Image: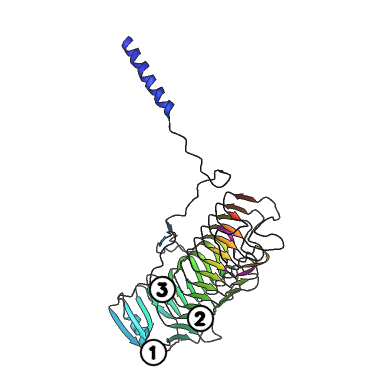
């Protein structure tokens, strides 16, 4: 019994000694001159999985998107045709597509082709359209209809052809429910968006310009590109310009996912009480890694970008104009890099305006905006972990204006420089 008691004492002593050592406390991170601790920065997910049910309950393909920061812009992969065909009229064009089945086909157009009915890329088809020579040849319609419709599980790529319509007719240039790739050519003169897509649309080059959208309310569409029903639009190059919308999104309207790696969205216009001269996010995500959004105009909010979730890793937003938020007016804007400069808010918020949303800045520059750098009002919230906000000018605030009707904003500056440019900065 005595031995047992001694053994218990030894065990208790060993346990007590182990507890005294413990794990050392983690050092408090230094988040600026004050050394105050802030929550860990939450990084975006590596992938984004879209919903696969449309508004009618029908199943759509699941698309997985890589959201890796600062990706290299891929070159457009070359087609791998097993059949090449040349066509010179509508009958030959439709016959070539109809007989292709599931075989990849490259169709070379040797003259302008006028279409008398909607040109359909059927389920299972894999078609590439290109012009034989420069200047490029065109697909033209002279009646009210969409020029091209791409069905689900079908693929179309256009290289150097034009898609246009006769003035006075209405419809979209391309309606895409499958996979649409654009590397050159143009889509212009359409009245129900240049491109409407509920599938996958990838743009490497070419121009989508001079299109309009006059629909309002729940039917509203972007002037240049409309992404609906969780569609995915990746812009690696090309230009979306000079489009006009009465609703929201002069250049691009997003109800899905828009990833911008390169290219330019410029000189688009939202008329009336519109939002988002360049890009408007209804629902979903806009992720900007590179490219330029410039010279877009809207009378209400968000000359460059407006609406829902917007994450900026790089690129430039400049020279845009709106009443509030000349550069950006977003409900949830996170900035990891890039530059927002030279934008104008005619009322307030030349660079960024946040009303009922959250602005988080980790890095990047916001400078030389007219109407102030950042405007936070209403129930808006702003947190700065880094970055530079400087040389902004306005009558009612310079770099950052904290105000609004409810006067219950949150402003937390943990780091970053306000009022001073980065070392060595040259405008």
Left or right, 228 with respect to 125, comes to right
Label 2 sits on residue = 188
Chief secondary structure of the magenta portion: strand
- The CA distance from mark 2 to mark 1 is 21 Å
- Pinpoint residue 303: horizontal percent, then vertical percent: 60, 68
- Pinpoint residue 22: horizontal percent, then vertical percent: 43, 30
User: Badge 2: how crowded within 10 Å, few (<14), some, or many (20+)?
Assistant: many
Say whether disc 2 or disc 1 marks the residue closer to the N-terminus.
1
- The CA distance from mark 1 to mark 3 is 23 Å
Q: Quadrant of the image for the N terminus?
A: top left
- Pinpoint residue 86: horizontal percent, then vertical percent: 33, 86
Instruction: Please state which of the two labelled residues, at mark 2 or mark 1, is closer to the viewer.
Output: 2
- The CA distance from mark 3 to mark 2 is 16 Å
Q: Quadrant of the image for the C terminus?
A: bottom right
Is the residue 265 above or below the residue 95 in the image? above
Q: Which residues are magenta?
A: 318-333
Label 3 sits on residue = 181
Say whether disc 3 or disc 2 marks the residue closer to the N-terminus.
3
Q: Residue furthest left?
A: 82
């Amino acid at each position: 019994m005595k031995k047992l008691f001694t053994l218990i004492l030894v065990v208790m002593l060993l346990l007590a000694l182990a507890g005294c050592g413990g794990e050392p406390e983690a050092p408090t991170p230094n988040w600026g001159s004050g050394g105050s601790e802030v929550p860990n920065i939450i990084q975006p997910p590596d992938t984004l999985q879209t919903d696969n049910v449309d508004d009618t309950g029908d199943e759509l393909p699941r698309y997985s998107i890589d959201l890796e920061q600062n990706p290299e812009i891929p070159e457009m992969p070359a087609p791998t045709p097993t059949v090449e065909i040349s066509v010179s009229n509508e009958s030959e064009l439709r016959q070539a597509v109809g007989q292709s089945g599931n075989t990849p086909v490259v169709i070379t157009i040797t003259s302008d082709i006028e279409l008398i009915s909607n040109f359909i890329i059927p389920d299972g088809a894999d078609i590439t359209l290109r012009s034989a020579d420069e200047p490029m040849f065109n697909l033209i319609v002279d009646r009210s209809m969409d020029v091209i419709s791409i069905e689900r599980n079908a693929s179309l790529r256009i290289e150097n052809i034009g898609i246009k319509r006769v003035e006075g007719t209405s419809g979209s240039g391309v309606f895409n429910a499958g996979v649409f790739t654009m590397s050159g050519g143009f889509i212009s003169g359409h009245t129900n968006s240049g491109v409407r897509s509920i599938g996958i649309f990838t743009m490497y080059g070419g121009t989508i310009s001079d299109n309009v959208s006059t629909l309002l309310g729940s039917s509203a569409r972007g002037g240049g590109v409309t992404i609906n029903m969780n569609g995915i639009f990746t812009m690696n190059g090309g230009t979306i310009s000079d489009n006009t919308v009465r609703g929201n999104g002069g250049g691009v309207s997003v109800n899905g996912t828009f990833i911008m790696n390169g290219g330019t969205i410029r000189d688009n216009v939202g008329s009336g009480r519109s939002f988002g001269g360049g890009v408007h996010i209804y629902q979903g995500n806009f992720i900007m890694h590179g490219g330029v959004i410039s010279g877009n105009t809207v009378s209400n909010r968000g000359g460059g970008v407006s609406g829902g979730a917007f994450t900026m890793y790089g690129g430039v937003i400049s020279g845009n104009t709106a009443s509030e938020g000349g550069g950006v007016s977003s409900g949830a804007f996170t900035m990891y890099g890039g530059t927002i400069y030279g934008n104008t808010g005619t009322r307030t918020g030349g660079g960024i305006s946040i009303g009922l949303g959250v602005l988080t800045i980790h890095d990047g520059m916001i400078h030389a905006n007219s109407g102030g750098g950042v405007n936070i009002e209403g129930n808006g919230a702003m947190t700065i972990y880094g970055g530079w906000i400087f040389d902004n000018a306005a009558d009612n605030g310079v770099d950052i204006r904290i105000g609004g009707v409810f006067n219950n904003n949150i402003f937390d500056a943990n780091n970053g420089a306000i009022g001073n440019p980065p070392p060595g900065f040259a405008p």
